[in-house]
Amino acid sequence: MFSTFSGACRSYFLLAALVKSLWVSFGIKKILKACRTENENVQLSGAALCPGKAYNKKKKETWGVCIFIVAIDLDEMTFTFTELLKSISISVCTFFQFLKEVDVNMDTVSTKVDSTVSRLKKKYDVLLALYHKFERTCGLIYLEQPSSEISAELSSVLVLKNYWITFLLAKGKVLQMEDDLVISFQLLLCVLDYFIKLSPPAMLKEPYKSAVTAVTVNGSARTPRRGQNRNTRTSKQIDTDTKVIEILCKEHDCNLDEVKNVYFSSFVPFLSSIGVVASKGLPEVEVLLKQYEELYLKNKDIDARLFLDHDETLQPDVIACSQLERTPLKNNPDEELNHILPQTPVRAAMNNIQQLIMILNSATDKPSDTLIRYFNNCTVNPKESILKRVESLDHIFKKKFAEAVGPGCAEIGSQRYKLGVRLYYRVMESMLKSEEERLSVQNFSKLLNDNIFHTSLLACAVEVIMATYSRNASQNDGTSAETDLSFPWILNVFDLKAFDFYKVIESFIKAEPSLTREMIKHLERCEHRIMECLAWQSGSPLFDLIKQSKEREGQTDQPEPTSSLNVPLQHNHTAADLYLSPVRPPLSATSTPDAQPTATPQTQKPQKSTSLSLFYKKVYLLAYLRLRTLFFRLLSDHPDLEPLIWTLFQHTLQNEYELMRDRHLDQIMMCSMYGICKVKNVDLRFKIIVSAYKELPNTNQETFKRVLIREEQYDSIIVFYNLVFMQKLKTNILQYASSRPPTLSPIPHIPRSPYQFSNSPRRVPAGNNIYISPLKSPYKFPDGFQSPTKMTPRSRILVSIGEPFGTSEKFQKINQMVCNSDGQLKRSAEVSAAPKPLKRLRFDIEGQDEADGSKHLPQESKFQQKLAEMTSTRTRMQKQKLNDGNDTSASEEK
């Protein structure tokens, strides 16, 4: 058996089957014991499982991975994940990477194992990020060498072990969804606040020392009077002991109200549950350790206590370490920041939340006066139904949030919902203003009384809030890490169909210019997921619309004709167009340029569904872009096959759309690619296709591992191809091998994104490496100013307006850089006209007149003067080009 063990990379499936057989015969305990003992021969069925010195590290890891796979598949996890890592002497990151290598043939690891690994990885990422933050924060709070009156034993227990174990226990008991980075961090701040107030002031650094001293003077939190009622004591402590939590929130850019909410709704009940609410000192370490041990053995996952020992099984790899580098320090006035440091996951999450709250500070959770005016202008006033809907969904959201996150987190969910309501009213008002300008009407009765429109708009607003708060610890690479609250969770909460939700996304983005690039990308990804699979689920209104489209003028009608594929996608539609399609309200219809007022109802044909037409155009575009990406990875040497594969792919989506029911767009794509290669005699195996596919962004292995074959029966994609896809399209596929292949489908026109990303830096012209970036996610400075946390490009002189600049040398260098372009941009002799205010930097664009900028105020800096000079007119620029050309000619003659 072991003579072929060196070829394990090619036969993990057989090895996993062997482990399963051994499992049944001997049990996991003996197998684990065998893996622990390298120098001991253990005989199983007459074969040496661990043959002494020949048993090397790689073989041990292989056995461990296979044991894990089988244990998950058989629901026989009689050991913890950490116990397994210890047995085979491997780290978490190495284990995950090795598991990926094991699944090289895509048939060893089931989707059940994939799901378990995903959960473990997310939990590990969150714990790692929080422990890094915990260590750094404790270093800022406690003195490294406290005064002699404080014992070393008390210091070590208080600062590290007691803190961390209490937090782990609180996190495990309070949160059902332990990969929520934001709530976990807020809970950590609650733990810090509790222990800081129990610490002797002599151990603390400022400003915590002064805060604790003030609390002690006003009424010590450590020595409450025994005669007081517990509720009275707690109430008084709440009133007088907020100084520490305020400092912690300010230092970490956390919202104070949110942290207080977590403290009183979750942390205080937790303390009560472990019997330490009225404690005069620290919780007993032994008691906490025992309770955490029970929790850890129940969950059978990661023993996070080992972070305290810097255990090798929990150490991140080099890449993870680079993502978790220390938070960038605020600018030192005496030092120049020469490079940009990455943000930690916690810092990035807090900054995103702060930016969101800043946007919504001016909004309210009630309709504004402007919205009330729109409501009053409606034939049927929608105000009462809107308010009732918002209130009803509030109760539903709180309940579902608490079920997903934890029973004590209902109020946290309510806070997030209220932020979503603010954004909902804000975007609604912006949409109505745009519609008023477009149609010159003020009566939007039909739209504003549409239940699906309002539910979709509110769901989109809440999704933006949830995505901002649900940033996972592993999102530094730009990918989206899903949590239990990730999209499409909100659709299930609001009982909303994905196709209806899709209608509002583009209008939502256009109506809210303050959305960050990350949020726009998130909503685009939601839209893509809807087009890929969610809109094609059974019960979706999409199938009814397609059926109506087919019946409109007989079976020859198509959801979207192929002739429109190479026509640029127009983005002039609005939410009203999509939600009121195919029948628009009479007032709106007569207000559009395309209206036909002379047509009678008897001669008018039923209007085509705008929402269906746009959906298919977007699906075609997404499908082609996905296909093109995969094609160039696999078939770049066969460019003639691309139009054939696309034609089959597009034909299936248009005419055999039932194949998409409860399936994924990429499944049809891979089958189309395999089918064309088959009939064209190009050697491309499904194994190679799925290997390349899983490396694409935003893909899931379940897409090719679990495909619907027939009702409630799933199998791999190759089984789907043979039993379903090929059976349905065999005649069409064989035509591509004949002398008269099908007519090729046009390649979709690939437009630029309709969304403007305001965060992109603008380059100052004239050839200098000077860029101006808009304000991004803020840090907080003592003087109230804010500065970006990221600046691009990575130049060596970074200046943020509003923060301390450091020495004057920065501006001198910038002035010198700008002045170097004087030979390229000659100043005009016109000195009478003052420059117009600059709204944005303009480049030499045809047809744009720019203000003359030759006159400057005495107090203006060189930098300001140069910005003004860049507003010269197009005529002057043309003259300058001519002069530059003459100068060049003269230099060449010399």
Image (spheres, rainbow, N blue to C red):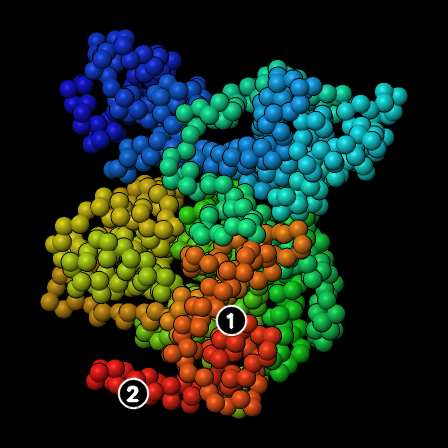
Secondary structure of the residue carrying numbered label 1: helix
Residue occupying image coordinates x 28% and y 35%: 101
Identity of the residue furthest to the front in this view: 894
Q: Position of residue 557 (x, y in %)?
A: 36, 72
The answer to whether 211 is drawn above or below residue 838 in the figure is: above
Q: Position of residue 134 (x, y in %)?
A: 56, 33
Q: Position of residue 699 (x, y in %)?
A: 37, 48
Q: Position of residue 261 (x, y in %)?
A: 70, 41
Query: Alpha-carbon distance for marks 2 and 1?
Result: 28 Å
Which quadrant of the figure contains the C terminus?
bottom left
Residue carrying label 2? 886
- Residue 766's image quarter? bottom left
In the image, 237 versus 825, the foreground residue is 825
- Residue 362's image quarter? bottom right
* 826 left or right, relative to 148: left
Residue occupying image coordinates x 84% and y 33%: 218
* 77 left or right, relative to 835: left
Residue occupying image coordinates x 63% and y 33%: 141
Picture disc at residue 62: none
Kind of residue indicated by mark 1: Phe
Kind of residue indicated by mark 2: Asn
Residue carrying label 1? 863
In the image, 748 versus 88, the foreground residue is 88
Query: Dots 2 and 1: beta carbons under 8 Å?
Result: no
The 10 Å Cα crowd at callout 2, few under 14, some 14 to 19, many 20 or more, is few
Q: Is any atom of residue 168 visible in this view?
A: yes
Which quadrant of the figure contains the N terminus?
top left
The answer to whether 46 is drawn above or below residue 17 in the figure is: above
